[in-house]
Amino acid sequence: MLELKAVSKSFGGLRATDAVSLVVPEGHIVSLIGPNGAGKTTLFAIASGFLKPDSGFIRFLGQDVTGLPPHEVCRLGLVRTFQVVKPFAEQSVRENILVGAYLRCGSRREAAEKVEAVAELVGMSDRLDAAAASLTVAGRKRLELAKALATEPKLLLLDEVMAGLNPTEIEEIIPVIRRIREAGVTIMLIEHVMQAVMKLSEHTWVLNQGRLIAEGAPEEIVRNPDVIEAYLGHGLAARMEKLEDA
């Protein structure tokens, strides 16, 4: 569905992504993990048109979308959310979702029906007339999901949708993400909450210092020595192995 081939991007002397290649299959929930500063959000920005790669290419549904602006990529059905959510604070939840709905809907009535359907999917039907500014962190995260879903994406890139949520809120949003996939939307997550990655993701890529260092099923990834080193520091994987053997 989405193919990134040898994608590289530098900012000054910093190599944010270094020849990254991956393929996202249609109909799945997959994930991209790695320590802070690994280049994950940069990769999402490149895939969705917010940044142009220095080299490499991006294909979506067989079409070369390298360098296309975000609104054109969105119209094709590839949509991203943002780690730091910024709703239109003075508008209602309904009005925020309407902004996304008008991408596909030709009339206000059609857009209003889309808003109702999306709000039900993400569990916000009872908050449609609330001001966006009044929402909790969990509510703003759901609103970010709703705004993206209103554009009718085929592939949804979720950038740390669970950041800032408490354990109960995380447990509540996991089934929402499953329902989105069941509604026909392919999902790729950037996530630090490994509980969610283990429950949701069918395949995981690990990025560190701009390079892919591992990929596979989440239960395999969490035992990978290179991944442990990337997250927890040099030499820890070997020390953990010795402790297990002791």
Image (cartoon, rainbow, N blue to C red):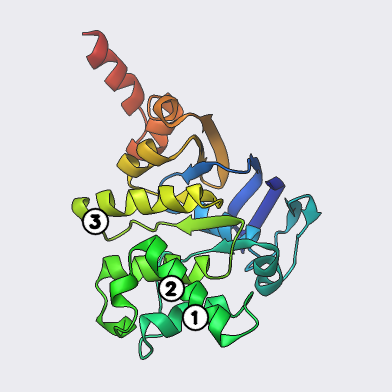
Residue 63 in the image: above or below residue 213: below
Q: Amino acid at mark 3?
A: Glu
For marks 2 and 3, give the CA distance. Answer: 22 Å
**In the displayed structure, does residue 109 sit left or right of residue 20?**
left
Q: Position of residue 179 (x, y in %)?
A: 43, 51
Q: Which residue matches tag 1? A: 112
Q: Secondary structure at mark 3?
A: helix
Residue 107 in the image: above or below residue 198: below
Find out whether the residues at labels 3 and 1 contact each other: C-beta distance under 8 Å.
Answer: no
Front residue of 202/212: it is: 202
Q: Position of residue 120 (x, y in %)?
A: 38, 65
Residue at 48% from the left image edge and 35% from the top image edge: 202
Q: Which residue matches tag 3? A: 169
N-term-proximal mark, 3 vs 1: 1
Residue at 44% from the left image edge and 29% from the top image edge: 221
N-term-proximal mark, 2 vs 3: 2
Q: Position of residue 27 (x, y in %)?
A: 58, 43
Q: Can residue 38 be seen here?
A: no
For marks 3 and 1, give the CA distance. Answer: 27 Å
Residue at 47% from the left image edge and 53% from the top image edge: 180
Taking the view exactly as shown, the residue that stands out farthest to the bottom is: 90
For marks 2 and 1, give the CA distance. Answer: 6 Å
Q: Amino acid at mark 2?
A: Glu
Residue at 48% from the left image edge and 72% from the top image edge: 147
Front residue of 154/66: it is: 154
Q: Amino acid at mark 1?
A: Ala
Q: Which residue matches tag 2? A: 116
Find out whether the residues at labels 2 and 1 contact each other: C-beta distance under 8 Å.
Answer: yes
In the picture, residue 78 is in which quadrant? bottom right
Q: Residues within 10 Å of mark 3 (few under 14, many from 20)?
A: some
